[in-house]
Structure formats: C-alpha cells, structure tokens
Image: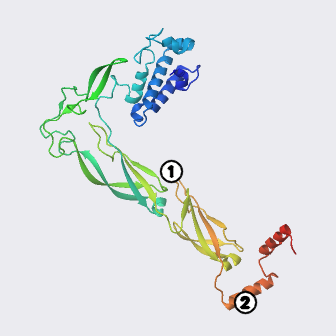
Amino acid sequence: MSKRDYYEVLGVNKNASDDEVKKAFRKMARKYHPDVNRDNPEAEAKFKEVNEAYEILSNPDRRGQYDQMGHAAFDGSGGAGGFGGFGGGGGGGFNDIFDMFFGGQAGFGGRQAGPEKGSDLRHDMEISFEEAAFGVEREIPVGRTEDCKTCSGSGAAAGTHAETCSQCKGTGQIQVAQNTPFGRMINTRTCDRCHGEGKIIKTPCKDCRGKGTTRVSRKIKVKIPAGVDNGSRLRVTHEGEAGMRGGPPGDLYVYIFVKAHKLFTREGNEVICEVPISFVQATLGDEIDVPTLDGKVQLKIAEGTQSGTVFRIKGKGIPHLRGNGRGDQHVRVKVLTPQKLTDKQRDLLQEFAKASGENVNPEQKNFFKKVKDIFGGA
C-alpha cells in the first residue's frame, strides 16, 4: 500500500514553519499514542506513521529531499538521507514523544523514583437554599491515608532506616538493552527488587507494615462561602491522600448540591417567588406581606394589577460570590379567581357587570368580535 503524504499525515501545508510542524506532531502523537488508545488496534500504526512523518519533516535536509523527490528519496536502505528507522538525527520524533509523555528524562521509559503528590479526594455535600445564599460552616468526615505517626512515614521500625536498593541504585528503575528492527534501544522497567521505591526496608514498622502510611478517619471543617450554587466545587488544599516518597498530600474537593426550596427559585443571583392575591386586591390595590430570605417585607400592589405582573424588591436576592452586594428578588403575583361564591357575592358581581354595561369581560367581547371579522358570520 502506498504511503500517505507526510504533510497530510501531520495535517500541515508544505509552507508550514518548523514550530507548526512540531506543534502538529505533538498533537497527533498525543491522539494516537498506544498508552492512551489501548482499545484501538489501529492507533499504533498511525502513531508510527506520525513518527515517520515528523522524523523527515523536522530535519531541514531530509525535508528538502522529500520536497524534491517525495518518498522515493528514502526508499531502500535509507536513500539519500540514510533514513532507516526512528533513531536518526534532526528533530528526533522519539525524543519529542519522550519529552511530551515523560518530561524529558534520559533513557526511554519513565522518570526516576521521586516525591509524588497524593491522590485527590471528593466529598458530596447537600445544603439548604438559605445556606447556599448566606454560607455555612460544616464539619465533614474524611477517610484518607496519612503518614504513619510511629515511623514518621519512613516505613522502617524505630532505630532502623530504609537502605538504598543495590540493584537500581535508588532510582526505582532498571534499564535493559534490546535489539529491535529499528536498532538497539534501551527499555526502562520498574525495579523488581524494590518495586520502584528505590529503597529496601529490612525491618518494617509494625503499625504500617512498611508502607509508611496508615488509614485514618478525620473530621474536617469546611467553610461554604455565601452565594454558592448547585454544582459548585470547593478545593481544600492538602486534605487529600498522603503523598509518596516525601511528596505533598493531595487535595479535597467538596461538591455542593443545593436542596430545592418550597417558595423560592434561583436564576444566577436573582431570587424568584410567586405570591397569590385575591381578585379584590388586584382590582383595588393593597399592601401585602411577601416572604424573602431575610424575613417578611411589605409590597404595595397597585390598583388594577394583572395576574403575572412581576414586582422587584432590590437587594433581597443572593449575595455575589466574589464581590459586594446582592441580587434582587422578583415577585410574580397570581390573581386567584373565586371558585365558590355565596348568593350575595354572585349578586354583587352581577351588579358590577350591569354597571359596566357588559355581560362579559370587554377584552373577551373584543376577542369574539375579531373572530367574527376573520371568519365571517352575523
């Protein structure tokens, strides 16, 4: 099968700069690296194709030959450029991959054993609508690993100490030379004697059994700031799992879930509620008590208020999470239509209709008139 154009493989044009070629290569190498595509059998082949393309285009001499002759410049035993694998000079695709995935350590395979940050922990917390608005301090239980108090995290019994592994010289890794079709390569593996720790504990601590850490359960105080919303995430530094080989502990992430309120809903920093009023209050106007997060306040209902009218109460919403001030509260009034009338109430409403000169609501009468105008009829 014929090879694809190297520029097409990397997704760049022939005038691409060296930086653009390198950036494209790193993007494609991340995408097809076998370690992150274990379920994709085609990834390894594409990964090699990307490497081969970059090996040529990252070297000015080879790129010039390729631009003139295409793949024919490197047929057979290496062609004009002597290309016979991935180990040549120039840009060095494998070197760039190593920099990207392993931080530029010498010798393909991984880093030397060193301090490692502990894992992060997660805790889900449910709080009330009011607690989300004004903040709250909670004490939460957290199970985590900590440095063993008996051995101070060394893993060795009192009066003893860990010894440097004689096989890997404290690196936690050993290097094995292999002959491959691409040449002689150095493969780095985890030391099988110290299991990557770089040290041997001959007399382990009885409490942690040489691990250097123990499992504990603690209660931690967490302050939830005013204004948090559902789905907010709070980071509590250094309250996660203990680090390894002297590394710092991880962090604790607290995810906030806010309970629904019976009266209020929230849109950003605005609070919304619906308040029922009577037909008489809407018609004649009134002053009513309205619930807010701070307690009841009086709201003036104007004469002739329609159902669905929204009134704003300034400064009664949710406090801003990272700033001063608060949002507003919006009160939507709902006019209740009487369902059960006494004879007296019915007589009074009929008198009202007669005094208005109409048997039905004027707006409703106008609506039916428009219908007749559209569809015809007497």
Q: Quick check: can you spot residue 37?
A: yes
Identify the image quadrant of residue 350: bottom right
Label 1, secondary structure: give it: loop
Identify the image quadrant of residue 372: bottom right
Question: Where in the figure is residue 212, as x and y percent of width and height?
Answer: 21, 41
User: Please, which residue is most extreme toward the bottom here?
Assistant: 343
Judging depth in this view, the residue of 116 and 33 nearest the camera is 33
Q: Which of disc 1 and disc 2 is earlier in sequence? A: 1
**Horizontal side of residue 346 vs 24, given as left or right:** right
Question: Where in the figure is residue 90, as x and y percent of width and height?
Answer: 45, 15
- The label nearer to you, 2 versus 1, is 2
User: Please, which residue is most extreme toward the right here?
Assistant: 378
Report the amino acid beneath label 1. Answer: Arg
Question: Where in the figure is residue 70, as x and y percent of width and height?
Answer: 54, 15
C-alpha span from label 2 to label 1? 59 Å
- Residue in view at x 63 percent, y 70 percent: 333
**Residue 160, placed above or below residue 328:** above
Its colouring scheme is rainbow
Decide: marks 2, 1 in contact (CB < 8 A)?
no
Q: Write down the residue under mark 1.
A: 322
Report the amino acid beneath label 2. Answer: Asp
Q: Residues within 10 Å of mark 2 (few under 14, many from 20)?
A: few
Label 2, secondary structure: give it: helix
- Disc number for residue 347: 2
Judging depth in this view, the residue of 150 and 293 nearest the camera is 150
Question: Where in the figure is residue 191, as x and y percent of width and height?
Answer: 24, 29
Q: Residues within 10 Å of mark 1 (few under 14, many from 20)?
A: few
User: Please, which residue is most extreme toward the top here?
Assistant: 80
- Residue in view at x 53 percent, y 59 percent: 318
Q: Quick check: can you spot residue 60?
A: no
